Image: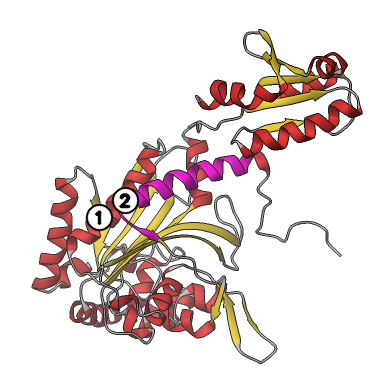
Amino acid sequence: MSMRAPRGTVDILPADAKKWQYVENVLRKIAHVFNYEEIRTPMFEHTEVFQRGVGDTTDIVQKEMYTFKDRSGRSLTLRPEGTAPVVRAFVQNKMYGIPNQPVKLFYFSEMFRYERPQKGRMRQLHQFGVEVLGSADPAVDAEVISLAMHSYEKLGLKSLKLVINSLGDRESRQHYRQTLIEHFTPHKDELCDDCQNRLNENPLRVLDCKRDMDHPAMKAAPSILDYLNESSKEYFEQVKQYLTMMGIAYEVDANLVRGLDYYNHTAFEIMSEAKGFGALTTLLGGGRYDGLTEELGGPNLPGIGFGMGLERLLLALDIENITLPIDETLDCYIVSLGEEAKQLAVRLGYDLRKNGIQVDQDYLKRGMRAQFRAADRLHASYVIVIGEDEIAKNIVTIRAMETGEQYEVNIDEVIEYLTDEILGG
């Protein structure tokens, strides 16, 4: 029996959890500024949600899902991505009928994918994502991309590259799809097994293959941009125009197709160009998925969103040597000597906490010197000392650790004193 964390999972210990909390708080505030509201979906869904939503030909559905049957024999799957569950919730709860449209949502979710673990890619991963449902305005595409770029820049990342493409509407995709089949069919036996299987079912996925990316046929493949109809071209031009107006630099990559079947029109990725990141440079991916609501049982409505890997984000911060402004201080540490003092410390600590002051104290029956060392290790701003003399005088001694100054404060005035000092009244 193994007593270690399963392969592809990690423990997030307190020191790292503070970084996660800081990043999540920044992202949450940005989502609020952009007027996105939080949604929380179940950790598992009926398997059909992902089969129909993500696509049977994708690697996620074919190779990576954690699927199981419950006691009633229903097939359930741990969430491998965030868009399909959000769209399912949107449809099920008839959010298309609420007055405020489009519906703009964000989420923090754990995902589960059975793939080979490597740096920045785990089997249990965490994502911040946004979805906008109900608008086909290219300005929404630009807004979603701008939210992602602003998030990275707000956290201090500089070595970023935004790559965009258009997959066109259904008509454009159908025309391009047939062209790809004709292009790759003479080379079918030279391609990997996955590409051979995808060629007739979803030939755009062949362009996303990492194993055959250097094959001559891949490099000579026709560009989807040459097969966009006029309305698709105009849509893409408007997206690019809005990005330019916001001062957001981008590159167009005609081979960017993303790995999920539901994408159409705008597709995008944000990559890290920092040295030392390795082969997996993509930090975030997203795009437009008009029609996914209909696929999951609702009305045919447009949608767009992205999923941001938090593990990748934290890795990028480390590689760019960005130190997050984590508060490592403690407001107050209570040093007590003797049982009577300990009882007073327990009561006082609770009262201080109720008033919003961060407090800790000794629970190992250590001497005064050891307790002061503990306060130092916790970077306490103030230490409250309670001993026999203090109890006799109905006071406590408060030491400001930065200056070493000490004050005697009546026990009934401690909360008011520290509230003024720490919280500013």
Q: Residue at x 68, y 35 (%)?
A: 351
Q: Are marks 1 and 2 in contact (CB under 8 Å)?
A: yes
Q: Which residue is mark 2?
A: 147
Q: Is residue 94 above or below residue 408?
A: below
Q: Position of residue 176 (x, y in %)?
A: 22, 77
Residue 393 among those drawn in magenta: no
Q: Nearer the viewer, residue 168 or 212?
A: 168
Mark 1 is on which residue type?
Answer: Glu
Question: Does residue 29 belong to the magenta stretch?
Answer: yes
Left or right, residue 338 beside residue 276: right
Out of 215 and 361, give the one closest to the viewer: 361
Residue at 59% in and 65% down: 115
Direction from residue 219 to residue 367 in the image, left or right? right
Q: Which residue is mark 1?
A: 143
Magenta span covers which residues?
15-37
Q: Quadrant of residue 396?
A: top right
Residue 381, image x and y in percent? 63, 21
Q: Quadrant of residue 298?
A: bottom left
In which quarter of the view is residue 92 placed?
bottom left
- Number of callouts: 2
**Could you tell me residue 268's position as x and y percent?**
31, 58
